[in-house]
Image (cartoon, helix red, strand yellow):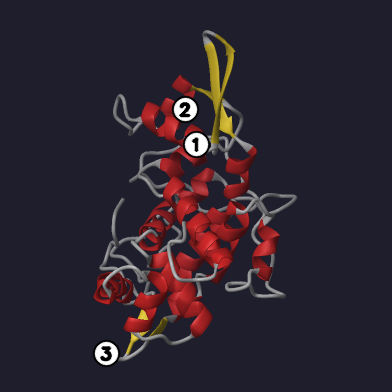
Amino acid sequence: MAITGLPPDTDADIARVTEALAMITPRWNVRILLALSGPPLRYSELAAKVSWLQNGQLHPKLKSLCDAGLVQRTEHTSRHVTYGHTDRGAALLPVLPMIVTWAEEHLEKADRPLPAIEQIEDSLTLLTRRHAAAILWVLKSRAEVSGRALARIIMPSSDWTNIYPPLRQLVADGLVDTEGIGQPYRLSVAGDGLGPVLGALSAWSSGQPLTHAAQHPVWGRPGAAPPPKPWVSNVSLPAPSASSAARVAGASHPTWQTRDLFSHTATARPKAALTAGGPRR
């Protein structure tokens, strides 16, 4: 069933990206995926890496990630069960550094230096606002659009004034601009800068390599640099507020370590979008 008045292929593209975001945005999901970015782990080993989770919180999170096809539960024997990424889960990891790159450029600065993992979580919060993906898609495709026209495209079966709450939120988040009441809406610089992230999520959710993001019909940028190479981690995760070592590059090819995502080297926060400290997950 169509969710917008857009062409079926565009509608399906938005729905897939929205679903992909819904898989990873819930609290702690990204951190659990990072904890599993090395060899498969027993439940107790994984629990030690995400020790800030209270008793009973990890199991339902793992189940939801398994149900989403991002994590695989392997039962070797009745007493030996491990958890690790599926191929789909591993293919999603290179999108995370792309989100950090966007956040460092477009999020306003916080009171304190933020670990990259928090930059990712703040960015995902913005992208999962209701109707956010559809609004961003339309504005990218059509440059400037009135609120009434947006409503006809995005929510054709609803009262057209229902478009304004999500629009106002995106303006407050710094992803959409307008000159004022009655004036058309357009992407801000930060909103337009989401192209590589949304293009990569579109490629991943449709089962294509992330390199196909540059050819996306809406967000593609032919000739753009390829996405970062996958990064790995085998180190224990610190608690969310803990600091760790600064980013380091691999000797033979660029990789990210989990400690890089928990370091405080990423200090940028959408300019004129988030209050100091940003929305916390």
Residue drawn at 32 percent across, 82 percent down: 148
**Could you tell which of marks 1 and 3 lies nearer the N-terminus?**
1
Q: Is residue 126 left or right of residue 249?
A: left
Would you name the residue on which mark 3 appears? Answer: 180
Q: Which mark is first along the chain, 2 or 3?
A: 2
Sequence order check, earlier mark of 1 and 2: 1
Left/right of residue 227 with respect to residue 271 in the rendered view: right
Tell me residue 158's x, y (percent).
Answer: 30, 68
Amino acid residing under circle 1: Ala
Q: Nearer the viewer, residue 201 or 257?
A: 201
Badge 2 density bin: few <14, some 14–19, many ≥20, Cα 10 Å: many
Q: Secondary structure at mark 1?
A: helix
**Residue type, mark 2 in image:** Leu
The tally of labels here is 3
> In the rendered view, does 27 fall on the left or right side of 245?
left
Percent x, y for residue 5? 45, 71
Residue 256 percent coordinates (x, y): 59, 50
At label 3, the amino acid type is Gly
User: Residue 35: which numbered mark, if any?
Assistant: 1
Q: Please give the residue where the numbered disc 2 appears in the rendered image.
A: 46
